[in-house]
Each structure stands twice: as structure tokens, then as C-alpha cells.
Image: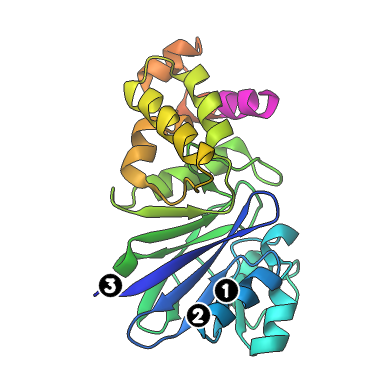
């Protein structure tokens, strides 16, 4: 029996919201509810209550449903301490190294600044699940709205150290466009080419590409591979630092 379940809820044009439920206690959390309506519908369909709301960062497409869910379920809202002034209604704030409990599921808080200055991620080892918000995407990473390339590179390196079987539940369905960009950085990467074809097949069938797996990201995501000599050479940056190579990849993606 699995220690817990993760339920993917599509929202808006390309957002994902996640329900996380402890199998033993029935305790249920929602991660990054951009809107309350889809969450309420899913909870009612399953006859579940809601105990916790977890936010990775302050953007409205990840927090817009907080108030409605708090009002309806009296759920406790937890978010990054560094963004406490930007998220209304927080009951608890967390720092890197803190633990979030969903019943018997223990989640590790990881600071991952870059997309926003106080962005965090939640890693639950018992269900091999990383909720990365808009830091790490399948084949991509978030835009640098508040942080620096150096911050984001070091944040991604933290996540890259998680086990290969980690399932990555990110905030958006950007994978197909990310794949089209990734092959411009590593056109000779055979696993990437195969993955791009598989992604096109999934999307043509209307199926999500999430979760992705950390092992695949290490092999194919250019933003996790900025310290690979072949990528630096392809970009004409053979002697550059990984931070500089990452910055160049991010700049190219912004213009893609």
C-alpha cells in the first residue's frame, strides 16, 4: 500500500494544482491552489475534507484559491517565511530545513529562490514527490522575475541532488514548448529527442506530461545541465562557469 496519493488538478490554461493525501490518516493538503473551485469539486467528488494549504510562492496563479478554501474548510495555510508579506492569511511560515506534516507524510522544505526571491519547494520522501512550483519544470525552469541566474542555478542544483526516482510535480504544463527549446541547446541528445516525441504523443492525446522523473530531467533538461562540457561548447562558452552558461540558456529561452 502506498504511503499516500497525489491527485493532479488542471486549472486555468496551463496550471496544475495538487492534492496530497496521507493513506493512513486521511489528512489532505492542497499545493498551490490558483483557484478554489476546481479543488472543491475534486474534494467533493472524492468525499474528502481539506486540512492544509501549501504555497510555494506568492504569485496569484498559485495562491488565488487560498481564501476560498480557508473559508470553506478552515484549512491551515503554510507558505514561505520570506514571502509572508506577499501572501495573505498565512497561519504558519516555513524556512529551509523545516518539516511540513500531512498526517504521517513528512515534507522537507527547500529554499529555491530565482523565480521569486522567497520561493520554496516541498519534498516528501515517503511518496518520492517534489512539489517544485515554478522553480523546476519538466525540461525547464521558471523565469527569473525576482532572482538572479546565480540564485536559480544553485536552487536547481539543490533539487538535482534529490534521488533519481523523485517524481516532479511542477506548477505548469509547459513541457512541450520546453522540449522544442531544449533540442536547440542539445540537438544530439538522443534521450532528449526520444522524450520530445513521447511528449508530443501525450499532448496529442490530451494527457499531462507531469509528473516527470528526476533521472530524466538530469539527462535531458538543459537548465540542469549547464555544467556539462558539451553544452558549454555548443554555446561557444567552453571556459565559462556553469552559472554563466545557465544565464545564457535562460536568456535564450526568454527570447525563444
Q: Identify residue for label 1.
A: 42
Task: Report the span colored magenta.
Answer: 247-256
Q: Nearer the viewer, residue 19 or 125?
A: 19
- The quadrant of the image that shows the C terminus is top right
Q: Is residue 62 visible?
A: yes
**Residue 46: numbered disc:** 2
Report the side of 226 relative to 104 (left or right).
right
Label 2 vs label 3, nearer the camera? 2
- Residue drawn at x 54%, y 87% as measured from the top left: 49
Residues at marks 2 and 3, CA–CA distance in whole angstroms: 18 Å
- Residue drawn at x 67%, y 61% as measured from the top left: 62
Report the side of 125 relative to 13 (left or right).
left
Residues at marks 1 and 3, CA–CA distance in whole angstroms: 20 Å
Q: Residue furthest left?
A: 1
Residues at marks 2 and 1, CA–CA distance in whole angstroms: 6 Å
Q: Identify residue for label 3.
A: 2
The reply to whether discs 1 and 3 touch (Cβ–Cβ < 8 Å) is no
The reply to whether discs 2 and 1 touch (Cβ–Cβ < 8 Å) is yes
Q: Nearer the viewer, residue 29 or 117?
A: 29
Report the side of 2 relative to 143 (left or right).
left
Q: Mark 2 or mark 3: name the one nearer the start of the chain.
A: 3
Q: Dot 3: few (<14), some (14–19), or many (≥20) neighbours within 10 Å?
A: few
**Residue 226: numbered disc:** none
Q: Secondary structure at mark 1?
A: helix
Report the side of 142 relative to 25 (left or right).
right
Q: Is residue 59 visible?
A: no
Amino acid at each position: 500500500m502506498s504511503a499516500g496519493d497525489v491527485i493532479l488538478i488542471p486549472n486555468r490554461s496551463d496550471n496544475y494544482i495538487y492534492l496530497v493525501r496521507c493513506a493512513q490518516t486521511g489528512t489532505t493538503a492542497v499545493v498551490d491552489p490558483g483557484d478554489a473551485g476546481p479543488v472543491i469539486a475534486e474534494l467533493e467528488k472524492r468525499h474528502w475534507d481539506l486540512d492544509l494549504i501549501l504555497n510555494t510562492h506568492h504569485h496569484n496563479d498559485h495562491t488565488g484559491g487560498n481564501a476560498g478554501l480557508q473559508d470553506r474548510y478552515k484549512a491551515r495555510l503554510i507558505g514561505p517565511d520570506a514571502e509572508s508579506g506577499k501572501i495573505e492569511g498565512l497561519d504558519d511560515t516555513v524556512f529551509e530545513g523545516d518539516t511540513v506534516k500531512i498526517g504521517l507524510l513528512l515534507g522537507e522544505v527547500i529554499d529555491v529562490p530565482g523565480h521569486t526571491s522567497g520561493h520554496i519547494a516541498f519534498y516528501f520522501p515517503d511518496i518520492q514527490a517534489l512539489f517544485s512550483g515554478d522553480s523546476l519544470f519538466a525540461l525547464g525552469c521558471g523565469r527569473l522575475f525576482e532572482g538572479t541566474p546565480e540564485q536559480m542555478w544553485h536552487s536547481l542544483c539543490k533539487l538535482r541532488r534529490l534521488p533519481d526516482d523523485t517524481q516532479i510535480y511542477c506548477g505548469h504544463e509547459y513541457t512541450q514548448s520546453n522540449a522544442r527549446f531544449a533540442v536547440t541547446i542539445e540537438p544530439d541528445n538522443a534521450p532528449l529527442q526520444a522524450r520530445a516525441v513521447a511528449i508530443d504523443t501525450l499532448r496529442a492525446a490530451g494527457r499531462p506530461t507531469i509528473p516527470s522523473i528526476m533521472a530524466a530531467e538530469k539527462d535531458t533538461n538543459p537548465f540542469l545541465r549547464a555544467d556539462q562540457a558539451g553544452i558549454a561548447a555548443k554555446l561557444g562558452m567552453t571556459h565559462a562557469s556553469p552559472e554563466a552558461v545557465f544565464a545564457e540558456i535562460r536568456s535564450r529561452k526568454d527570447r525563444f
